[in-house]
Amino acid sequence: MDALSDDQLLEELKARFTKNKEDLEIFQKFTDELTSVNAKLAESEAHKSHFISHITNEINNPFTSILGLAKNIMEMPSGNEHRMRYMAKLIFDEAYVLDFQLKNIFAAAKIEAGNFSPHYSRTEIIGMVLRVVGSMNHIADQLKVDVKIENSLPSNELTHHFAYTDAEKLELTLINLCNNAIRFAKPGTVVTVYVSKPDDNHILFTIQNFGKVLTPVEMSEMFDRFKRLEENINSINPGQGLGLSVAKAYSQIIDGEISVESTGEKGNIFSLYLKTQMPTGNENTTEPDGYELFTDDEELF
């Protein structure tokens, strides 16, 4: 083997030093990425731990209340019908909250498992909005918030407006958006649900409330799963921080898009821009019980 000259030796050492430096930079990059991933995993685990703790309370508390109230009614002597009705209303309120929480938990589990194919049906829109708002009335009464509907759909001799969509997913999406608007509205204010038709192929649901003005960071994080804007477990606004993430995921599944804007003058406005025609070639078409179907002479968006 020929001996290297001094210049060749210096060039070889320089090349090796350069290669070692590049390897160290690559190693440092991988180390930084691994540190970032570990930090995100730790944050995710912390959110999940808080979520599980919160969910335990959200489920156990209504169950305990329902059992206690039912027992009191059973043991109550006759002649206390007024008190029985009051306690029955409390049972209904607790059962409604529990049912709402469980629906979101099951929906989130399906989303996590990838089991979320839409099932399109011809769905009567205004009837659904009326059901959603009606189901929120007792919560609005408790929080001293009024809820009203503003219907800007084209009016003619027909009273129904229909759309192709997944009725179950749309309804839970609207319930979550309305529930959020009511719970975070200031007492004495009005939550308004606007329904309009911006074009032939879409319908727009806009839900407005007057509460805390949201920051850009809050608006970007409010749809994250396991995350609540109010982390205090004793917050006056109950819920596990899951509803808006379910609404966001479901809206995307049914060809919709949710947007948020927040100003002191207009309040907080959540908009759901929904495609109302079934995608071409979609075979998941059902006619679920409880939703009106249209005939040829009725209006379809």
Image (cartoon, helix red, strand yellow):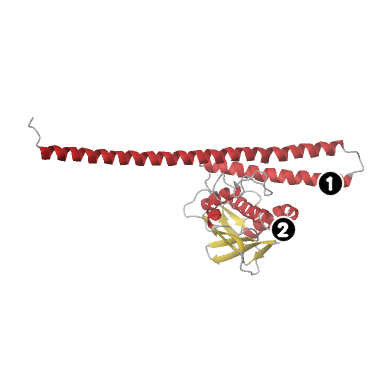
Q: Residue 236, percent across and down?
A: 69, 49
Q: Is residue 252 above or below residue 76?
A: below
Q: Residue 205: where, in percent of width, then height?
A: 59, 60
Furthest residue in direction top, as rendered: 1
Looking at the image, is mark 2 or mark 1 nearer the viewer? 2
Q: Position of residue 183 (x, y in %)?
A: 67, 53
Residue 275 visible in the displayed image: no
Please state which of residues 283 and 17 is positioned toward the viewer in this rendering. 17
Q: Residues within 10 Å of mark 2 (few under 14, many from 20)?
A: some
Q: Is residue 292 above or below residue 100?
A: below
| Type of amino acid at the residue the image marks with label 1 | Arg
Instruction: Give the residue pinned by disc 1.
Output: 85
Question: What is the residue that sits farthest to the bottom in this orientation?
Answer: 156
Q: Quadrant of the C terminus?
A: bottom right
Q: Amino acid at mark 2?
A: Pro
Residue 21, x across and y down, in percent: 27, 40
Mark 1, secondary structure of its residue:
helix
State the image quarter where residue 27 is shown: top left
Classify 10 Å Cα crowding around label 1: few (below 14), some (14-19), many (20 and above): few
**Which mark identifies residue 280?**
none
- Residue drawn at point x = 62 percent, y = 38 percent: 53
Residue 187 marker: 2
Precedes in sequence: disc 2 or disc 1: 1
At x 53% / y 38%, what residue is drawn?
Answer: 45
